[in-house]
Image (cartoon, rainbow, N blue to C red):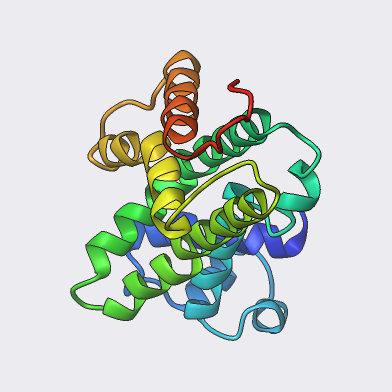
Amino acid sequence: MDRRAHYLHVALEQFALHGFHGVSMDQLVTASGGSKATLYRYFPSKEALFEAIIADLANATVAANTEDQLGALPIADALRALGHATARAALSDRATVLFRLAVGECGRFPELASTMFERGPAVSYARMRAFIDNRVAAGELRVPDSQIAAEQFLGGIVGHQQLRQALGQPPADPTEITARVEAAITTFLAAYQAPGQLSP
């Protein structure tokens, strides 16, 4: 683990234990075993640390270069890859901690919850929307509102389980995740696949 990743890991641990408001940059220096100068070189504030944690998670959910990676795949296979990547990231322990943290702190720090949404789910939705728009342009899909379609697909995979985990319920097993991904693909293509395109 490189130094930047180490700071992010320690910060998330400390935020989970003490809340965002209960952790200072000095405490993070002590907990990480690093130096204040090094920490501030990477992250000038707690807010910057929090944003970086969320940004890393968003990149793991729907990567910025999604279409470059998946553009050659048939639509069902591309959706399958996106679905499993989304589940791995959004249902990870890190994501669950962040979700609880944002909800727990939103009364005192509403900007924290806003940052959580804008740098996390909103980024994932935007990248998924771009993927959908590209497939519409290629004639594979007919989608009247790609934002709604993105929310339906990603939410159908992680929404229910994410809430369960945030409330302390056990994580879904791989079989359940696969079933949710396949159901989301079937529903998505039934609604949006262009006429004449092959079903999965």
Q: Position of residue 189 (x, y in %)?
A: 50, 32
Residue at the spot 47% in from the left edge and 56% down from the top edge: 146
- Name the foreground residue: 35 vs 15: 15
- Name the foreground residue: 72 vs 84: 72
Residue at the spot 28% in from the left edge and 78% down from the top edge: 109
Give the quarter of the figure containing the C terminus: top right
The answer to whether 24 is drawn above or below residue 30 in the figure is: below
Residue at the spot 50% in from the left edge and 29% down from the top edge: 185
The answer to whether 169 is drawn above or below residue 8 in the figure is: above
The answer to whether 14 is drawn above or below residue 198 in the figure is: below
Q: Position of residue 30 (x, y in %)?
A: 56, 68
Q: Report the number of numbered marks.
A: 0
The answer to whether 20 is drawn above or below residue 81 in the figure is: below
* Image-quadrant location for residue 184: top left
Q: Residue furthest front?
A: 196
Residue at the spot 77% in from the left edge and 44% down from the top edge: 71
